[in-house]
Amino acid sequence: SAPAPWPVPDAWRRQAADLLAGRGIDPARPFVAIHPGAGAQAKCWPLERFANVASALRQAGTPAVLVLGPVELDRWGDSATKPLGQQFPVVAGPDLPALAGLLSAAACYVGNDSGASHLAAAVGTPTVALFAPTDPRHFRPLGRCVRVVAGATMEAIEVEQVLAEVT
């Protein structure tokens, strides 16, 4: 059985709600959190595919919020992150309490094999975790509702596969 979700303090939830409101997202309405990064580049699904998922969700009436950590901001720089910010709400570099609050408020989370994916699952958010080349049998996030989409390579995973798993 899945472990019980970690409790998220109200102060962290309020901090996340303020971040979301500042980006035009009503934190009381359903949204999907998307974290397109990971510590290793080989564990990252192509950024444009995450943007395709966010666009499809928006067309279906559910906004997506992209969460970028320090690694992504350094790796991709302004040339990639500024266009994302013009298309979607972006939360860049939240501290750990704000990230936990944001993930706990999301209707669903989509991300690579990363710490943020493990945190989303741990706080009880339905999680779609993308895996390659690591083995999800050993490294999948633990939570009450975790779906894994795995491929031989990250490029082998299709947008439609990911969208089919988003709740």
Image: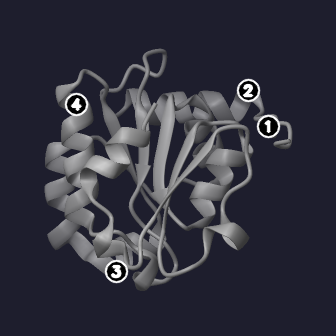
CA distance for labels 2 and 1 = 15 Å
* Residue indicated by mark 3: 75
Q: Mark 1 points at which residue?
A: 5
Nearer to us of marks 3 and 2 is 3
Q: Where is residue 24 in the image (x, y as percent from the top left)?
A: 30, 27
Which amino acid, by three-letter code, is at mark 4?
Arg
**Is 163 on the left or on the right of 56, as rendered?**
right
Query: Circles 4 and 2: CB distance less than 8 Å?
Result: no
Relative image position of residue 71 (x, y in whole percent): 45, 75
Q: Looking at this view, is 24 or 137 the one in front? A: 137
Q: Earlier in the sequence, mark 4 or mark 2?
A: 2
Residue beneath label 4, please? 58
Q: Return the disc, 3 or 4, that comes first in the chain's sequence.
A: 4
Name the residue carrying label 2: 10
SS class of the residue under badge 4? helix
Circle 1 SS class: loop
Q: Which residue is drawn at 39% across and 19% down?
A: 26
Dot 2: element: helix
Counting other residues with Cα less than 10 Å from the Cα at mark 3, is it few (<14), some (14-19), or many (20 or more)? few
